[in-house]
Image (tube, grey):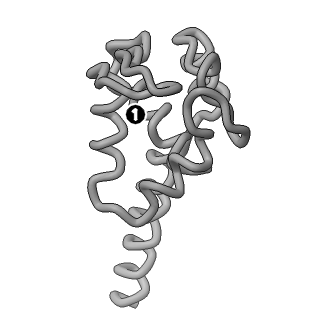
């Protein structure tokens, strides 16, 4: 009986962890629309910037994926568009939860 209780506790913790990591795709896309991200990016078609599915593939399996992508969308690094370097626009939010949700949404594609 004790083993069953421990097993159920572990399953419960795993479920809670998965639920807390759930992505709100609508909220992520709304923030990205507000931030004009879709001007240069789309989910699966090439524009001035890479499609988000390609970004997700680039970071897949990398331990620092979330941190690296968060840095990219919040710190305005220089990017090259049609041979011209320009500053990548930062996402229009200072809320860490909103930013994390957007990053996790991209990585989930």
For the N terminus, which image quadrant? bottom left
Label 1 Cα crowd, 10 Å radius (few <14 / some 14-19 / many 20+):
some
Residue 81 left/right relative to 71: right
What residue appears at the point 46 percent right and 61 percent down from the top-left corner?
Answer: 60
Image coordinates of residue 78 in percent, x first then y, are 31, 24
The part of the image, by quadrant, that contains residue 20 is top left
Q: Nearer the viewer, residue 39 or 71?
A: 39
Disc 1 secondary structure class = helix
Number of marks: 1
Image coordinates of residue 9 in percent, x first then y, are 38, 71
What residue appears at the point 34 percent right and 62 percent down from the top-left corner?
Answer: 62
Residue 39 left/right relative to 83: right
Q: Nearer the viewer, residue 94 or 16?
A: 94
Image coordinates of residue 30 in percent, x first then y, are 62, 18
What residue appears at the point 40 percent right and 26 percent down from the top-left corner?
Answer: 99
From the viewer's perspective, is residue 72 above or below residue 6? above
Query: Which residue is at the far right?
Result: 45
**Residue ID for mark 1:** 100
The part of the image, by quadrant, that contains residue 27 is top right
The part of the image, by quadrant, that contains residue 73 is top left
Residue 68 left/right relative to 18: left
What residue appears at the point 58 percent right and 49 percent down from the top-left corner?
Answer: 54
Image coordinates of residue 82 in percent, x first then y, are 52, 26
From the viewer's perspective, is residue 20 above or below residue 30? below
Q: Nearer the viewer, residue 99 or 62?
A: 62
């Amino acid at each position: 009986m004790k083993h069953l209780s421990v097993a159920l506790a572990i399953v419960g913790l795993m479920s809670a962890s998965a639920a807390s990591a759930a992505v709100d795709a609508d909220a992520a896309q709304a923030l990205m629309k507000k931030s004009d991200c879709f001007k240069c990016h789309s989910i699966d078609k090439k524009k001035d910037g890479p499609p988000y599915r390609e970004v997700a593939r680039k970071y897949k399996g990398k331990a620092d994926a979330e941190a690296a992508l968060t840095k990219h969308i919040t710190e305005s690094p220089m990017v090259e568009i049609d041979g011209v370097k320009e500053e990548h626009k930062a996402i229009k939010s200072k809320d860490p939860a909103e930013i994390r949700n957007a990053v996790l949404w991209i990585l989930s594609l």
